[in-house]
Amino acid sequence: MSHSALAFGANSTASTTNNTGAAVDDPVQRELLAAVRALRTDLERLVATEATEVLDAELVAAEEEITASGAAGPARLERLRASLTAAGEWVGALGSGVAVAQLVTALVGG
């Protein structure tokens, strides 16, 4: 059986999560995915600003793109880079923010 959930009994519930996304084969993309997730967690500790909210939305979109297709494309990486820059020093103070910025720069160049 696959892509199924079963429940038995009077008050039973069943749920399932099926990952139908692409495998992330590229080690740099896997590292970026992990860094994106870490930065999202770290952003929850900061006082939200418009810039950090935009960054969080871009991080969500990047995570979705990587898990769906196996990689973040050039346009997504550029938007992520712009959001990192706009969020400024707060993101730079987070180790996870530095990691994402370095990986995006490595993937986009310059």
Image (spheres, rainbow, N blue to C red):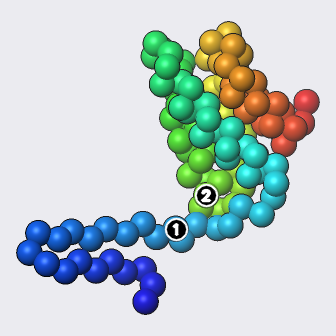
The quarter holding residue 23 reads: bottom right
Say if 23 sits above or below 48 in the image.
Answer: below
Say if 85 sits above or below 106 in the image.
Answer: above
On the rendered image, what quadrant is the C terminus found in?
top right
Q: Nearer the viewer, residue 73 or 36?
A: 36
Left-right relation of 91 to 50: right
- Residue 48 in view: yes
Mark 1 Cα-neighbour bin, 10 Å: few <14, some 14–19, many ≥20: few
Say if 60 sits above or below 82 in the image.
Answer: below
**Number of marks in the image?**
2
Task: Kindly identify the amino acid type of the residue bearing the numbered disc 2.
Answer: Thr
Tell me the distance, in whole angstroms, between the alpha carbons under discs 2 and 1: 9 Å
Query: Do residues under tags 2 and 1 come within 8 Å of each other at their CB atoms?
Result: yes
Q: SS at mark 2?
A: helix
On the rendered image, what quadrant is the N terminus found in?
bottom left
Task: Kindly identify the amino acid type of the residue bearing the numbered disc 1.
Answer: Asn
Residue at screen point 67% across, 34% down: 80
The image shows residue 97 at horizontal and vertical percentages of: 69, 25
The residue furthest front is 9
The image shows residue 67 at horizontal and vertical percentages of: 61, 58
The image shows residue 58 at horizontal and vertical percentages of: 57, 36
Q: Earlier in the sequence, mark 2 or mark 1?
A: 1
Q: Name the residue tied to disc 2.
A: 67
Mark 2 Cα-neighbour bin, 10 Å: few <14, some 14–19, many ≥20: many
Left-right relation of 14 to 108: left
Q: SS at mark 1?
A: loop
Q: Name the residue tied to disc 1.
A: 19
Left-right relation of 65 to 1: right
The quarter holding residue 68 reads: bottom right
- Residue 86 in view: no
